[in-house]
Image (cartoon, rainbow, N blue to C red):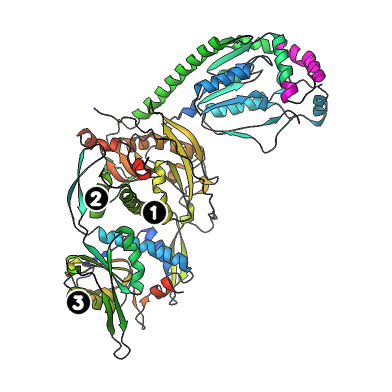
Amino acid sequence: MTTEPFKNVLLLPQTNQLLGLYTIIRNKNTSRPDFIFYADRIIRLLVEEGLNHLPVEPQTVVTETNEKFEGVSFQGKICGVSIVRAGESMEQGVRDCCRSVRIGKILIQRDEETALPKLFYEKLPDDIANRYVFLLDPMLATGGSAIMATDVLIKRGVKPERIYFLNLICSKEGIDKYHAAFPEVTIVTGALDKGLDENKYLIPGLGDFGDRYYCI
Amino acid sequence: MSIMPMDDDYPISTISSQESSTNDLDTDSIDTTNTSESSLTESVESKYMPPWTKPYIIGIGGASGSGKTSVAAKIVSSINVPWTVLISLDNFYNPLSPEERQLAFNNNFDFDDPAAIDLDLAYECLLNLKEGRKTVIPKYNFVEHNRVPDQSITIYAASVIVIEGIYGLFDRRLLDLMDLKIYVDADLDVCLARRLTRDIISRGRDLEGCLISWQKFVRPNTIKYVRQTLHNADVIIPSTGDNTVAVNLLITHIKTKLELKSKQHLKELIHLGLSDTRLINEIPVVHQLNKGHQIRSLKTMLLNKNLSRADFIFYFDRIASILLSKVLDHMSYTSKVSIETQNGHQLADQILCRFDQITAVNIIPSGDCFMHSLKKTIPNISVSKILIQSDSKTGEPQLHCEYLAPNISQFKQVYLMESQIITGTSIIMAIRVLLDHDVKIENITIVLYMATEVGIKRILNAFGDKINIFVAHLVSNKDIHDGNKQWALKRFVDVKYFGC
């Protein structure tokens, strides 16, 4: 099953600034403090982009001059769900925009016997079915764990059109595979890489995001 | 028709220490966007004349000891505006050669001859000030009889200049620059008494030496030259007894002149941009945030007077970050690098953003609302500060002080930040300050949270569409005319952000 190319994909505008930020985080010689700072900046842009697509309702407020202003208000009702461990790096970016947002976690690891991703742990808000969900995972390579995580969300009653999958880098292969399973989920990304190497790493990618953000 | 009440009067805030730039300004291997090195600033045809372009110059002359200095001091303190500068012609004494210095130490050098003063330099300095340029005047040491090395006085943006000295009304070139010429007159014996007191107490001379120089130089020169300058004066002030009435009359006259100058300044400012009928959305240098849901809801929240200050600060910082990111998206100053990724992929020609080529200038206090988001976006950015306040009665913007990065003209991008503009007058003055410090006009970018259309058009008209303006919440003339948008004419953003 093939998907319509780039339907439900929001690619951030490829401005000089954004490309410059990616140059920094892709460079293997970038120090960890810089990697974190500039990755966080991209994450913030992804979150703001995602938020801009959530619905609002009309709201009238009273201004400093006691005149009424007819504006809109954000409905709230969102939650973040990170795929442990690399996805957790994106939680702060969501918190920076929505201070008291609920954040769920899903741990998926590769099963050594079957070589397939396996769900180890999930902890999600009880009312997640009523919420918009920002699924957080920095890299979309093969899409294996993202598909499994999305499956968990849908089984908990989340509507697929209410899921926004935020990642920093993805590949066409990954998008196709993911959208074959969940065509209605919107992917918000900042870079589209050429493809995958024999180890299923993104080319050119940036290495292991979790390692670079947390360890190296 | 309601056009802009000038209500930009905010209290003076303390100025936080200025960050010095640690940026590496090496410009090797960078594609610059500069076209030519020559005369870019000169080509700026600014329609805006700040008050320091035509300062009001008062010259005061009179014999040594006649009381010029105290008249000058009374005038300066009565005008009571911080951008008044008092210059003493004593600063312009010529440095002495070793032989002359020896003569001086023996009280044998004629300091009271017009030739002892560098009137050419005095003219040059006064002319610079008259034309609004930054000026450096020397400092003279009367004990050493020499200019104090490395200790000159920099004067910039004075709108009233008082210049006093025995030969204050002597040189025709200086006289031509003056708006008011005052001669302070006193009997010579009164002058001698005052002079003795001053020279012995504050200049470390002995009585005998003072008397010698009085007889030999001061008295004859006063009779020969100084007295003649009386004919150049507009006013002669007696200085033997109580001259309060005369001085007060003068001060009233000066105040009237300054008020007129203020009104003219304000009138010119207000007039800018009023005849510009272009659609604001079609002016290419004006950039607005997109109309996305999140942006609209942030703007709505920030307008809500019931929003708590904590929330206001949080949401302002959010939208400010979005705005700054949009500004950076337009960054033209980049270079290319080759990098290797952790997986060993070589990438050539990758864009490298020169964040180190950007500096910010905050207009105090309103521009400081951007400080948090600015530091979150470019952590080590150098930030200059300018304090411009509007007079609470007239609304005339007045430059109080500027703390600019010393290398500000070398940055490729200068972001001038203010959270809200209503009349646009302080931004216009701030731009003028930057241009006076050799910043190229095309390197200036203005970042605003809220702005009125007329304010933006004033900026564009003053500087001819050469400056990019980024604004998050723009309120059109039509919206204000149609009513219900008077909040755009009330300064509330920085008031609420800082809580005062």
* Residue at the disc numbered 2: B296
Q: Which residues are magenta?
A: B198-222
Residue drawn where x is 80% and y is 25% of the image: B104
Task: Give the number of the disc on residue B328.
Answer: 1
Whether callout 3 and callout 2 share a subunit is answered no
Q: Classify B318 as above or below A211.
A: above
Residue at 41% x, 26% y: name it: B265
Under circle 1, the secondary element is helix
Q: Are tags 1 and 3 found on a single chain?
A: no
Q: Nearer the viewer, mark 1 or mark 2?
A: 2
Residue drawn at x 37%, y 33% is: B8
Q: Residue under circle 3?
A: A181
Amino acid found under the numbered disc labelled 3: Ala
Give the x, y percent position of residue B390.
Answer: 40, 31
Does residue B252 appear left or right of residue B230 in this picture?
left
Furthest-bottom residue in this view? A113
Answer above or below: position of B266 versus B255: below
Q: Do discs 1 and 2 belong to a common subunit?
A: yes
- C-alpha distance separating marks 1 and 3: 37 Å
Asked if residue B492 lies left or right of residue B350, the reply is left
Magenta stretch: dominant SS?
helix
* Relative side of B403 to B185, left or right: left
The residues tagged by marks 1 and 2 sit, at their Cα atoms, a distance apart of 21 Å
Q: Position of residue A56 (x, y in %)?
A: 19, 55
Marked residue chain, label 2: B
Q: Residue B275 got which mark?
A: none
Measuring from the top left, give residue B389's x and y in whole percent.
Answer: 42, 33
Near mark 3 (Cα within 10 A), the count class, few <14, some 14-19 or many ≥20, is some
Q: Is residue A204 visible?
A: no
